[in-house]
Amino acid sequence: MEDVWRYLHVLSMAFFVGGQIFLVAAVVPVFRGREEAREDVRAVARRFGGGSLIALAVLLVTGSAMASEDDLWSETTLHVKLALVALVAGLVLWHSKRPQRHELEGAVFVVSLVIVGLGLALAH
């Protein structure tokens, strides 16, 4: 089962972080300053947000399963990672209420990259 958990965990992480990279690197720069496209960009972001919630749920389930199988619950790295996951969840919720606060997007992105690094550290 460990391979299934890891596969689903990495796939969900790739969707969540990869989607953020795509939005930051491609969507936002292409449409920045184009008022006529503002609603289209918001629609893309809302659609991604829905998928992100599903990805986050899968990440929590699979991460918990892997931490249990590998007996990682006492690891400081895991505790830091979980605290940052909670921070990202809070930032995502805050951003959903205040989409004009673009600094929240950046914070979610940066913290997500740190979480990926911590996940890699736990895997080795």
Image (tube, rainbow, N blue to C red):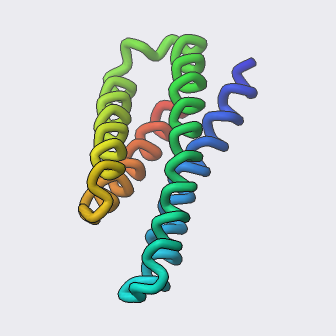
Looking at the image, which is closer to me, 17 or 44? 44
Image x and y of residue 16, in percent: 53, 49
Compared across the picture, whether 85 is left or right of 2 comes to: left
Residue at horizontal 54 percent and vertical 46 percent from the top: 50
Image x and y of residue 28, in percent: 44, 76
Residue at horizontal 58 percent and vertical 20 percent from the top: 66
Quarter of the image that includes the N terminus? top right
Compared across the picture, whether 76 is left or right of 27 comes to: left
Query: Total number of numbered labels?
Result: 0
Looking at the image, which is closer to me, 121 or 97? 97
Quarter of the image that includes the C terminus? top right
Using the rendered view, name the quadrant where residue 100 is placed.
Answer: bottom left
Image x and y of residue 68, in percent: 54, 11
Residue at horizontal 52 percent and vertical 19 percent from the top: 64
Looking at the image, which is closer to me, 82 or 29? 29
Compared across the picture, whether 34 is left or right of 55 comes to: left
Q: Is residue 99 above or below residue 63?
A: below
Using the rendered view, name the quadrant where residue 3 is placed.
Answer: top right
Residue at horizontal 61 percent and vertical 41 percent from the top: 12
